[in-house]
Amino acid sequence: MESDFHRLLGTPRPGGVLVVSDHASNRVPDDIDLGIDPALLDLHIGIDIGVAAIAERMVGDGALGGTAAWLGNVSRLVCDYNRKHDVPGMMPEISDGHAIPGNVLTPEQRQARVARFFDPYHAGLAALLHETPPALILSLHSFTPALSTSDEPRPWQVGVLYNQDERAARIAIPWLEAQGFVVGDQEPYSGKLLNASMNRHAEPNGLAYLSIEIRQDLIGDASGQAEWADVMTRLCAEVVARLPQGR
């Protein structure tokens, strides 16, 4: 199923796993002109590199039954779904030092984008979670090997983020470390600060979630995506099997 604002892969099932990836696409609708070099859409400011392919593989291979995926279907530069409602960064006028002139909007134009993308994306996800509550939400993102403002590399291969609900994170971190990965606990940034979609859909509803950041250079090609799809499938199975009941 595909719409202007989302893609739904697989068939969600109660007690299954739902992969949620807010930044899975770099699509810009034909009637929106961001006024930028299209090459920027292939960078991190336009898309979380690799995550859509991982979600597609997790759903398609059927290794973890009941896995479905809810994916954003526009670039984060058009509308960033992983933001609090109507904050400036939802449609950034500057991103990573690049001006985005097509995001200099009137209040009316801004609200039109909210109504077209942000509101139906989150309303649809909320309805899906209510109708078929999963055992686990996998919130899937990727991050850059280094900040554009720094030459210092980010050493973590994968990060685990969380806010108040740490149930899944406390299972995932030692499991990933046992697989030999360099794991960031609240790295490359803290889920206490940047966790908007899960704060909206999971935390207040008692739904267990695992917020994962994978370094994008590891998942930029098909082999890396296949490897990490397998890792995420095995990780989700482990977390679901060991999740404590309640909060």
Image (cartoon, rainbow, N blue to C red):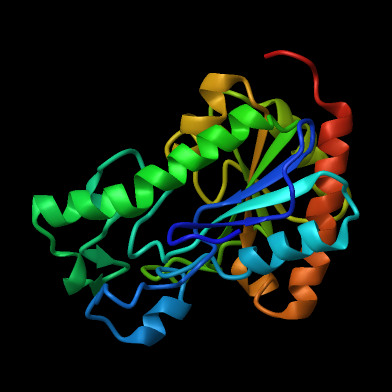
Instruction: Measuring from the top left, give residue 69's x and y in whole percent.
Output: 67, 52
Instruction: Measuring from the top left, give residue 5's x and y in whole percent.
Output: 44, 57
Q: Quadrant of residue 203?
A: top right
Q: Which residue: 81% across, 39% down?
A: 174
Whether residue 148 appears in this view of the structure is yes
Q: In the displayed structure, does residue 133 sit left or right of residue 144? A: right
Instruction: Measuring from the top left, give residue 225's x and y in whole percent.
Output: 74, 70
**Up-down relation of residue 141 to residue 194 (above or below):** below
Q: Which residue: 88% across, 53% down?
A: 179
Instruction: Measuring from the top left, give residue 246's x and y in whole percent.
Output: 72, 13
Q: In the displayed structure, does residue 25 sit left or right of residue 120? A: right
Q: Which residue: 52% across, 34% down?
A: 126
Relative depth, front residue between 157 and 30: 30
Q: Quadrant of residue 207?
A: top right
Relative depth, front residue between 199 and 64: 64
- Classify the position of the N terminus by image quarter: bottom right
Relative depth, front residue between 43 and 27: 27
Relative depth, front residue between 92 and 25: 25
Q: Which residue: 64% across, 30% down?
A: 131
